Image: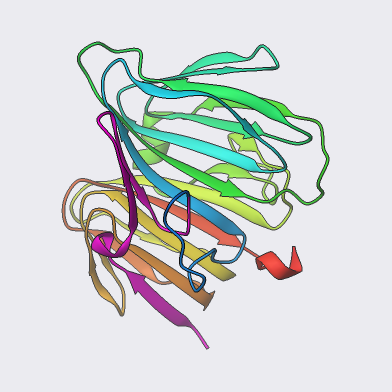
Amino acid sequence: MTSVDIRRASDRGTSTTEWLDSKHSFSFAGYYDPANTHHGLLLVNNDDVVAPGAGFDTHPHRDMEIVTWVLQGALEHRDSMGNTGVIYPGLAQRMSAGTGIRHSEKNGSVSERVHFVQMWVVPDEAGGQPGYQQAEIDDGALAGGLVTIASGLHDDAAISIHNKNAALHGARLQPGDTVALPDAPFLHLFVPRGDVTLEGAGTLREGDAARFADAGGQRVTASAPSEILVWEMHADLAAS
């Protein structure tokens, strides 16, 4: 039987500095709730805004698949494997931390903030080779319905992740546009921008999320220009 747990934007944990406004859907950094550590395979869903000319200095990661999706502005990436890139709206990026990688994320603009969502899932196996991938997704595809941004499950994804039970989908919706959610034992729907109506649950506004168990087919309809991110997961953390 399908269950839906609505999480409001105001319920999220926060990290705020002079240059960072970060909202945490799950326990992260200084925010810890033992009852809110993950959903399915998703451990991190951070909604970050970084001021012009600022960002995250070089820091380490290990054994994590990290997907970054930019909503506004541009984010500069550099890592210890020599990868560099500028991530902007419509460009999907994945960093596999594997046995260990160090990277920095900076807003290179002197005038515009950067707004992005960073999401972490565990890999199928620990101790893999660190890696990096990015790919641009056509604006028209994102406006036409759910597009598979990152996946270890579907072959048509823009970028791959090393988890055979997880996939991230996204869409940009105009008022009246409707998409149906995929079938999965676990789904996480996040609204980083706009307002939508979730069938059977009502309105989700910017920053709201819905966590599903045994879901599929529920319709999401935009009531304003909106963007949605949907994780489809066929295992939970304990079974991954």
The answer to whether residue 183 is seen in the rendering is no
The answer to whether residue 29 is seen in the rendering is yes
Q: Position of residue 93 (x, y in %)?
A: 54, 30
Classify 54 as above or below 205. above
Classify 127 as above or below 13. above
Task: Name, please, the residue furthest toward the bottom.
Answer: 1
Quarter of image, res 197: bottom left
Q: Position of residue 43 (x, y in %)?
A: 56, 56
- Please report the residue visible at 52 percent of the width from the left and 22 percent of the height from the top: 104
Left or right of 157 in this view: 199: left
Classify 43 as above or below 129. below
Left or right of 169 in this view: 117: left
- Please report the residue visible at 47 percent of the width from the left and 62 percent of the height from the top: 188
Does 7 lie within the magenta span? yes
Left or right of 83 in this view: 137: left
Quarter of image, res 115: top left
Does 106 lie within the magenta span? no
Tell which of 12 and 144 is nearer to you: 12
Q: Position of residue 145 (x, y in %)?
A: 40, 48
Quadrant placement of the C terminus: bottom right
Give the color scheme: rainbow, by chain, secondary structure or one colour.
Answer: rainbow
Q: Position of residue 232 (x, y in %)?
A: 56, 60
Tell which of 151 and 44 is nearer to you: 44
- Please report the residue visible at 58 percent of the width from the left and 23 percent of the height from the top: 103
Classify 116 as above or below 46. above
Tell which of 149 and 98 is nearer to you: 98
Tell which of 97 and 85 is nearer to you: 97
- Please report the residue visible at 18 percent of the width from the left and 52 percent of the height from the top: 175
Q: How many numbered marks does the figure carry?
A: 0
Q: Which residues are magenta?
A: 1-28
